[in-house]
Image (cartoon, helix red, strand yellow):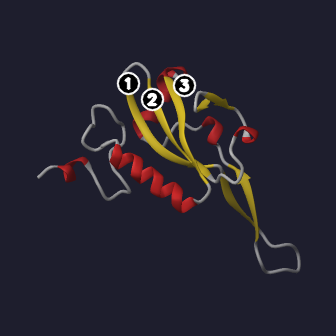
Amino acid sequence: MWLYQDKVIEGMDDIPPNSVGFIYEVTHIPSGKKYIGKKALYHKKTKPPLKGYKRKRVEFVESDWKSYYGSHEEVKSLLKEVGSEIFKREIMEFSKSKKRLSYLETKYLFQREVLENQDKYFNSNILGKFYPRDTED
């Protein structure tokens, strides 16, 4: 179950129109540790061309956002070990473009100082460029 502004989001009807994705925060309730990430609502699926044509067909299909908990390995292993009941999932903000989605994720990660607070966050890097060791002099 996803929460957005204290409302339950169950399907695409509950999502603001023209949204391509959202920024989320998953909290491991027993430890209070959090993970911040982004999730696209749709994926591009390429199909072979129709008979007699050369151009591949492109179709957009809904992603697995309803059952998604994050890409971090520790979060995934906790999910397998004890299940989803010990996690709280919150949508922080929706975005109408992929580029803004990436910007917002980076913004939240830096604002919350996830690299400096490794005891509070699962996030271990930002953009694959910044790591906890980069915050030290």
Which of the two discs, 2 and 3, sits closer to the camera? 2
Image spot of residue 93 (x, y percent):
54, 44
Location of mark 2 (residue): 27
Location of mark 1 (residue): 32
Q: Quadrant of residue 7?
A: top right
Give above or below for 38 relative to 127. Answer: above
- Give the SS element for disc 2: strand
Q: Quadrant of the N terminus?
A: top right
Distance in Å between CA atoms under marks 1 and 2: 6 Å
Give above or below for 26 relative to 132. Answer: above
- Give the SS element for disc 3: helix
Q: Residue at x 59, y 59 (%)?
A: 97
Distance in Å between CA atoms under marks 1 and 3: 14 Å
Q: Quadrant of residue 20?
A: bottom right
| Residue ranking furthest to the front | 5
**Disc 3 residue type?**
Ser
Give above or below for 135 relative to 54. Answer: above
**Disc 1 residue type?**
Gly
Q: Are marks 1 and 2 in contact (CB under 8 Å)?
A: yes
Distance in Å between CA atoms under marks 2 and 3: 11 Å
Question: How many residues crowd around disc 2 within 10 Å: few (fewer than 14), some, or many (20 or more)?
Answer: many
Which of the marked residues, 2 or 3, is nearer the chain's N terminus? 2
Image spot of residue 24 (x, y percent):
51, 40
**Observer-nearest of 66 and 108:** 108
Q: Which mark is residue 84?
A: 3
Which of the marked residues, 1 or 2, is nearer the chain's N terminus? 2
Q: Residue at x 57, y 59 (%)?
A: 98
Which of the marked residues, 1 or 3, is nearer the chain's N terminus? 1
Question: How many residues crowd around disc 1 within 10 Å: few (fewer than 14), some, or many (20 or more)?
Answer: few
Image spot of residue 59 (x, y percent):
76, 61
